[in-house]
Image (cartoon, rainbow, N blue to C red):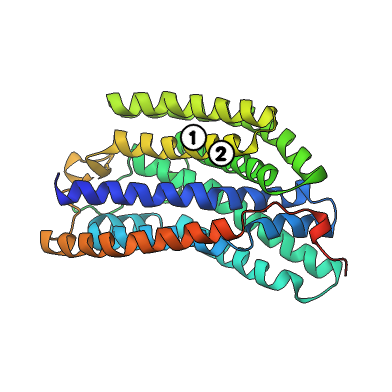
Amino acid sequence: MELTTIWFLLVAVLFTGYFILEGFDFGVGMLLPVLGRDDRQRRVLINTIGPVWDGNEVWLITAGGAMFAAFPEWYATLFSGFYLPLLLILLALIARGVAFEYRHKRPEASWKRRWDHAIFWGSAIPALLWGIAFANIFRGVPLDADHEYVGGLLHLLHPYALLGGLTTLGLFLTHGAVFLALKTTGDIRHRAGTLAVRLGLGTAVVAVAFLTWTLTIRSSPAAVVLAASVALALLGALAAARVRREGWAFTGTAVAIALAVATLFAALFPNVMPSTLDPAGTLTATNAASTPYTLTIMTWVAVIFTPIVLAYQGWTYWVFRKRIGVQNIPQH
C-alpha cells in the first residue's frame, strides 16, 4: 500500500475518532438547557464530560496537523476556501472551553446562565458546521486549475451541505443523550434515555436521506455497504436505548458515526477535494501529498507515539468511568 493511501486512511481515522469522542460532548453541551432543570443538574451534565472534553479535542489538532504535513495542498485549499466556517468553529470551541473553566468562578445565577449559553452555542455551531464542511469536501467546490478556491460563502450553503450539517447535528445530539444515559443516575438518566430514542428516530431519517443523496453524487461498493451499515447501527442503538442498555446504545451510536465518516472517505478516495469547475483542479491523494521522504518520517513518528496517546486517553476514560448524579454535587 502506498504511503499516500496510508495517510489518507490515517486522516480519516483521526477525524472519525474526533467525531465519535467530541461528538458526545457536543451533544451534552447542546442538551444542557434541555436536561439540566436546575444548577445542580446542569453541573452533573458538565461533570460527565469535564475530565475528557479537552482530551477529545486533541484528535482535531492531530487530524489538522496530519493533514498539514501529509497533504499540504489539501490543507491550504481547505483552510483558505473554508476560512469563515472554520474560523467560526474555532471561536465556538474557544468560547466553549472558556465557559467550562469560568462557569463555577462566581455564584450568581446570571453569571452561570451566560456561560451556559456559551456552552450551548459553542457545541451547536461546530456540530452543524462540521457537517456542512465535510459535505462540501465530498461534493466538491469551485477550484481552478491551480487548485485555488474561487467561490464564496454562498457556494458552501447549498441544500446538500445543509442536510449534512443537520445530520451531524442530529447524530451528535443522539450520541450525547445516550452518553448521558450511560454516565448518570436517577431522573437525568431516565430522561436522557427517553430523549435519545426520540432524537434518534428523527436523526435516522435525516441520516438516511443524506447518505442516499451522497451515494448518488459519488459511490463505490464499499461506500454502499458502509452507508447501509450506518442505518443498522443507529437502529440497533435506539433499540438498546429503549430497553435501557446504555452501553450497547453508546456503542451503536459510536459505530454509526464511524461508519458515516467512513462512507464519505470511501466514496471520496482517491480524491481529497473534487473541483466542480475543472477536473484538472481536483485535488487527489497523490497530487496533494508531501514528498515520500516526509511521509516516511511521519509514518515512523505515528507508529511510535500513537499507541502512547491512545493508552493515556483510554486510561483517562477508565479512571472516570463511574456514573454520577445530583447526590455527587454539593449544594452551594
Q: Residue at horizontal 36%, vertical 55%?
A: 81
Disc 1 to disc 2, C-alpha distance: 8 Å
x and y, in percent, of residue 50 in the image: 64, 62
Q: Which mark is residue 182?
A: none
Displayed quadrant of residue 77:
bottom left
Q: Which mark is residue 171?
A: 2
Q: Is residue 152 above or below residue 53?
A: above
Q: Residue at horizontal 55%, vertical 56%?
A: 317
Displayed quadrant of residue 99:
bottom right
Q: Are marks 1 and 2 in contact (CB under 8 Å)?
A: yes
Of label 1 and label 2, which has the lower sequence position?
A: 2
x and y, in percent, of residue 59 in the image: 43, 58
Left or right relative to 159: residue 189: right
Quick one: label 1, few (<14), some, or many (20+) residues within 10 Å?
many
Q: Nearer the viewer, residue 142 or 102?
A: 102
Displayed quadrant of residue 76:
bottom left
Provide the residue designation for mark 1. 256
Quadrant including the C terminus: bottom right
Q: Residue at horizontal 26%, vertical 48%?
A: 8
Q: Is residue 209 visible?
A: no
The residue under label 1 is which amino acid type? Ala
Quadrant including the N terminus: top left
The residue under label 2 is which amino acid type? Leu
SS for callout 1: helix
